[in-house]
Image (tube, rainbow, N blue to C red):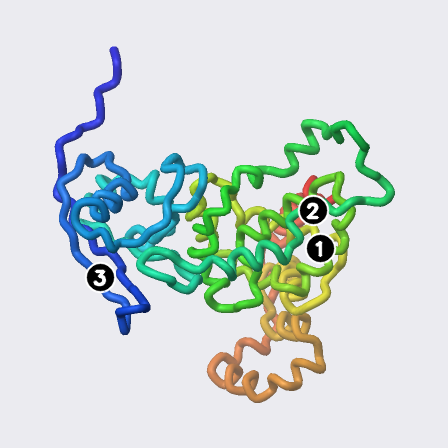
């Protein structure tokens, strides 16, 4: 028996759409529209209906309408989405309305259109192309074959459509302009594991000190990605590879390694030891004032933690987890 068709009874869809025309508006505002649409209607179709039938001044980007080009990425009820593949029904059920806003972390040019120059500049900074390896010159006039296992190491990165949904969702991008962004790091991973690339060591050394450890590990980029690229997992892999290849060269990597060593030592965190290992004795002297203020409120920071019960089992887990992964080799 064929499956029942999805209900097509129209629903009332209240839209609140971010509007800003710098030529006429002193500040952004929200315009309200109400449509009757089938629940399966994509948000993009609804916005085009608003533009074509109600307000022709509404400005937005779109192209393929098939979740391939990535042009229609925007904020739908505060989540980075592709408007062409986001149906209105679940949004109405969950929120009672549909609030449409431009992508975050990029300057708004007009309405839902943003200036993606920062996004593309960070992408270009990772040299998103193969760098020839002099010891393995590219063959002339024929293909350069790879094994299935070598291709598998790319993981999900070839799926990326550069929609910038991950960049928009990333709090690290908002907090620190030095952070390259999830897509750039996922693309970097793709070239680091490519056996034809001759710049692996240089890529890892540069990114180690140019923002890799600014990632907040919130996984919002992976949640936002419409193609399941899982950039947060690729950032984790890059961190492992960077430590293996170039060691701990700055506070971020030192903090990560020291954190793991602290837990392995006693099963609990020794926060004073962690700070000393992260910043080093000289840099830590500059934090004495702040350290004293923290110590007054939390004097247990200076106490050495007692080893927990089951420490042997914990260390066995560490031994198992520290087996080098395929990506880190």
Q: In the picture, residue 62 is in which quadrant?
A: top left
**Residue 30: numbered disc:** 3
**Residue 204: numbered disc:** 1
State the image coordinates of residue 117 (x, y, percent, origin top left): 50, 60
Q: Earlier in the sequence, mark 3 or mark 1?
A: 3
Q: Which element type, helix, strand or loop, lies under badge 2? A: helix
Q: Which element type, helix, strand or loop, lies under badge 3? A: strand
Of residues 324 and 314, the one nearer the viewer is 324
Q: Mark 3 or mark 2: which is in front?
A: 3
Contact, CB < 8 Å: mark 3 with mark 1?
no
Question: Could you tell me which residue is drawn at 71 percent across and 55 percent down?
Answer: 204
State the image coordinates of residue 203 (x, y, percent, origin top left): 71, 54
Contact, CB < 8 Å: mark 1 with mark 2?
yes
Judged left or right of residue 125, residue 67 is left
Q: Residues within 10 Å of mark 3 (few under 14, many from 20)?
A: some
The residue pinned by badge 2 equals: 192
**Residue 297: numbered disc:** none
């Amino acid at each position: 028996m064929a499956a029942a068709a999805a209900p097509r009874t129209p629903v009332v869809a209240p839209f609140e759409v971010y509007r800003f025309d710098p030529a006429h508006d002193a500040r952004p505002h929200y315009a309200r529209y109400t449509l009757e649409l089938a629940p399966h209607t994509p948000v993009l179709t609804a916005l085009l209906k608003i533009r074509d039938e109600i307000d022709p001044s509404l400005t937005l980007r779109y192209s393929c309408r098939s979740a391939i080009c990535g042009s229609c990425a925007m904020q739908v009820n505060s989540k980075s989405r592709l408007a062409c593949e986001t149906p209105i029904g679940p949004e109405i059920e969950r929120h009672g309305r549909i609030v449409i806003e431009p992508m975050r972390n990029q300057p708004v040019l007009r309405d839902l259109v943003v200036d993606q120059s920062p996004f593309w500049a960070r992408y270009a900074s990772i040299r998103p192309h193969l760098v020839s390896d002099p010891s393995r010159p590219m063959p002339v006039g024929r293909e350069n074959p790879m094994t299935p296992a070598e291709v598998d190491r790319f993981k999900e990165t070839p799926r990326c459509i550069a929609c910038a949904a991950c960049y928009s969702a990333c709090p690290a991008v908002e907090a620190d302009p030095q952070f390259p962004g999830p897509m750039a790091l996922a693309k970097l991973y793709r070239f680091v594991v490519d056996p034809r690339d001759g710049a692996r060591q240089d890529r890892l050394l540069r990114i180690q000190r140019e923002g890799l450890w600014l990632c907040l590990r919130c996984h919002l980029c992976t949640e936002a990605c419409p193609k399941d690229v899982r950039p947060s997992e690729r950032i984790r892999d890059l961190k492992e590879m960077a430590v293996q290849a170039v060691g701990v060269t700055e506070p971020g990597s030192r903090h990560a390694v020291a954190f793991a060593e602290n837990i392995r030592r006693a099963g609990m965190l020794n926060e004073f030891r962690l700070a000393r290992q992260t910043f080093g004795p000289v840099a830590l002297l500059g934090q004495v004032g702040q350290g004293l203020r923290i110590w007054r409120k939390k004097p247990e920071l200076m106490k050495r933690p007692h080893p927990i019960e089951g420490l042997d089992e914990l260390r066995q887990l560490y031994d198992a987890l520290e087996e080098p992964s395929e990506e880190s080799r």
